[in-house]
Image (cartoon, rainbow, N blue to C red):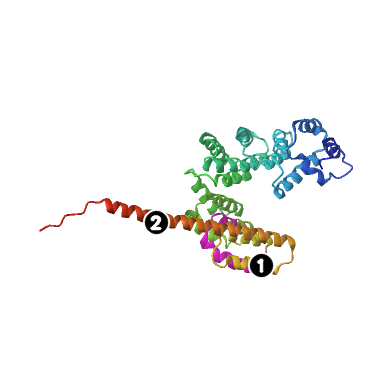
Amino acid sequence: MTSISFQTVINALLDTEKPFPKRYLAQFSDLDPESLELLMQVWPRITLQRKRALLDDLDALLSEDSLVSFDDFARALLHDPDAFVRAGALRLLSECEDVTLLPIYEDILAHDPSPEARAEAAQVMNLFVELGELDEIPATLHRRAEDALLAAMHDSFLEVRRRALESLGYSSRPEVPSLIQAALEDQDPDWQASALIAIGRSFDHEQWGEEVLRFMLSDDRAVRLEAVRAAGNLMLTEARRPLLQMLEEEEDDEIFSAIVWSLSQIGGEDVREYLESLLDQTDDEEEMAFLEDALDNLAFTEDLGRFDLMAYDLDIELDEDDEQSSNSRKPKKKGHG
């Protein structure tokens, strides 16, 4: 791929008589300024159908290959005339931590005429809420992201409000739990699923653990799927047994995979035995690779648990040492009589 010129890629984009070669997709990663300028010069001449297909293909590649980055290309498309192109560009920026993008996202979320673009802006802003909670961006920017998402909870389109709620799941703002609770109590399964996504991002198993267990029994597929994922993200130990039981009964492939991954996040008794048994029973290479990844993640979970236990034991020893040291410094009471 390094031997072809970017002009060749552009020519292929412009040639609507032939399908665009998938092998050229990686050429859009980390574009140099000259190639990006050349691409944007011809961008108006590319058919809308091909533009949208290209962005979908790049998004799919991004989910498969952690080494590619389409940030520079996506930035150039944030003000594209086509709403689906703008939305596709936002998806490509889902892992970009550049805070200079925040004002652009805020503007799209508040003013873009397309609900699809507003919904994508609400979704991509979850990263800045999470980074703010981890103190990795300035507090002022963290609050701006939260304020924009809270305002979006009044958007006229359901999809925008749902994505805003999901992104607010990372937030510790006092307004958020009541929004999540209201969504859980809504009879619309879409709202319940969004609430469970937010719960999975909240790191608050004490407040939401029982709700997650309850919705794991939902008849609605999307709700059940997000409840399973939330159980894993919260590392909800109470969910281990129900998940193991679901593993034996679930027929939906996506939910089955989510159960496996959540168990790898929770760990504990019998989990390794179950996952290794599943691995022994399959001949499918893709399934084997997934189960091996799950077992690797389980090993990480187990190591984390041992580290926490060691830290807990160390805390006890330090507390005991402090108490003994404190007692040795106390003056002995003199006896009477």
What span is colored magenta in the figure?
229-251
Which image quarter: residue 245? bottom right
Of residues 164 and 270, the one drawn nearer to the viewer in this rendering: 270
Predominant SS along the magenta part: helix
Mark-to-mark CA distance, 2 and 1: 41 Å
Give amino acid for label 2.
Glu
Camera-near label (2 vs 1) is 2
> Does residue 89 appear left or right of residue 316 in this picture?
right
| Amino acid beneath label 1 | Leu
- The x, y position of residue 52, in whole percent, is 77, 42
- Residue 273 left/right relative to 288: left
Q: Is residue 305 above or below residue 158?
A: below
| Residue 43 included in the magenta stretch of the image | no
**Residue 222 falls in which quadrant of the image?**
bottom right
In the picture shown, does residue 280 fall above or below 206?
below
| Residue at 56%, 41% in the rendered image | 131
Residue that carries the numbered disc 1 in the rendered image: 278
Q: Which residue is mark 2?
A: 317
The mark nearer the N terminus, 2 or 1, is: 1
User: Where residue 66 sits in the image (x, y, percent)?
Assistant: 69, 47
